[in-house]
């Protein structure tokens, strides 16, 4: 997508996903043997796994933009994300 836009503001915690270790194992097809941060392919940030709580938490940032141009050229579907 090509358009003129004005950055409104970054949102450092736009989406949060919480799940048990077993859920993260299933969702990612990965194993999480201990507490700590893990890199997930395709994710913007690592997840934080806490074995004592049996919980993994992923927090993804994003940005808010105001579209200034009414003429958009759409080449392919796009997802607006900080860092990409």
Image (cartoon, rainbow, N blue to C red):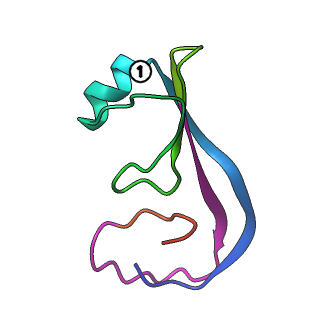
Where in the figure is residue 13, as x and y percent of width and height?
67, 45
Residue at point 38%, 48% (across, down): 40
The part of the image, by quadrant, that contains residue 42 is bottom left
Direction from residue 25 to residue 61 in the image, left or right: right
The quarter of the rendered structure image containing the N terminus is: bottom left
Where in the figure is residue 80, as x and y percent of width and height?
50, 65
Per the image, the residue denoted by label 1 is 21
The part of the image, by quadrant, that contains residue 65 is bottom right
**Extent of the magenta region:** 57-77
Residue at point 64%, 62% (across, down): 63
Front one among 68 and 58? 58
Q: Residue furthest right?
A: 9
Residue at point 41%, 21% (across, down): 21
Residue 37 forms part of the magenta stretch: no
Q: Please tell me how crowded label 1 is: few (under 14), some (14-19), or many (20+) other residues with Cα within 10 Å.
A: many
Total numbered badges shown on the rendered structure: 1
Residue at point 48%, 72% (across, down): 84
């Amino acid at each position: 997508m090509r358009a003129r836009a004005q950055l409104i503001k970054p949102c450092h915690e736009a989406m949060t996903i919480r799940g048990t270790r077993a859920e993260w194992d299933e969702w990612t097809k990965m194993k999480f043997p201990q507490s700590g941060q893990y890199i997930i392919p395709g994710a913007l940030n690592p997840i934080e796994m806490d074995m004592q709580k049996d919980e993994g938490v992923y927090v993804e940032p994003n940005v808010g933009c105001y579209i200034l141009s009414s003429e958009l050229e759409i080449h392919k579907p796009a997802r607006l994300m900080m860092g990409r």
